[in-house]
Image (cartoon, rainbow, N blue to C red):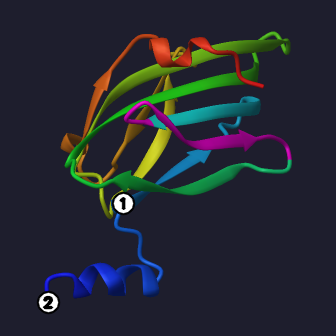
Amino acid sequence: MKWLPILILPALGISSAFAGEFTVTDDRAASEISETSRLYIDGNLAATFRLGPDVSTLTKRIQTPLGRVNHDYALCGEITIVNDDGKREIHQVSSEGILHNPDGRSFEALGAEDFTDFFLRDPRDPTAVEHHPGHTGVCAAPIT
């Protein structure tokens, strides 16, 4: 009766196409006016974050595809800040990397280098993310 688990999974509402899930939290920095960012996992759009005056933090649950332990990620964003002179600046930020065994983890989306780098981090395990600084081709499309 090897076919029994296959019949039970859909009946329980469990998808056999996903192996697991993790969360990503994005917080608006004090100097940010707004932020719109996209997270791609294995080349597919997994989440969009829109932060502004009324939304300072968002946490999204991301499902991972079946059959992989490591997942490529790209994080793309447009961040509007107030600079030291009180003027608005818009920064296009992105980077990419690899998530190592992300299932069950909680990642943070972070901006660094004066809002020129944008990446994921697991505060409890720095080895869970391989960060590749620099702009990624996945983020070439404008954010709307």
Left or right, 80 with reference to 8: right
Q: Quadrant of residue 128?
A: top left
Q: What residue is shown with label 1?
A: 18
Judging depth in this view, the residue of 36 and 114 nearest the camera is: 36
Q: Amino acid at mark 2?
A: Met
Q: Nearer the viewer, residue 116 or 82?
A: 116
Element type where label 2 sits in the image? loop
Q: Quarter-wise, where is residue 105 in the image?
A: bottom left
Report which quarter residue 27 is drawn in: top right
Is residue 37 placed above or below 50 in the rendered structure?
Answer: above
Magenta range = 41-53
User: In terms of depth relative to the viewer, which is nearer, 88 or 59?
Assistant: 59
Q: Please determine whether, in this image, residue 13 is positioned above or below residue 68.
A: below
* Residue 121 placement, left or right of 144: left
Q: CA distance from mark 2 to mark 1?
A: 23 Å
The quadrant of the picture occupied by the N terminus is: bottom left
Q: Residue at x 71, y 32 (%)?
A: 35
Residue at point 71%, 23% (across, down)? 143
Pinpoint residue 88: horizontal percent, then vertical percent: 83, 15
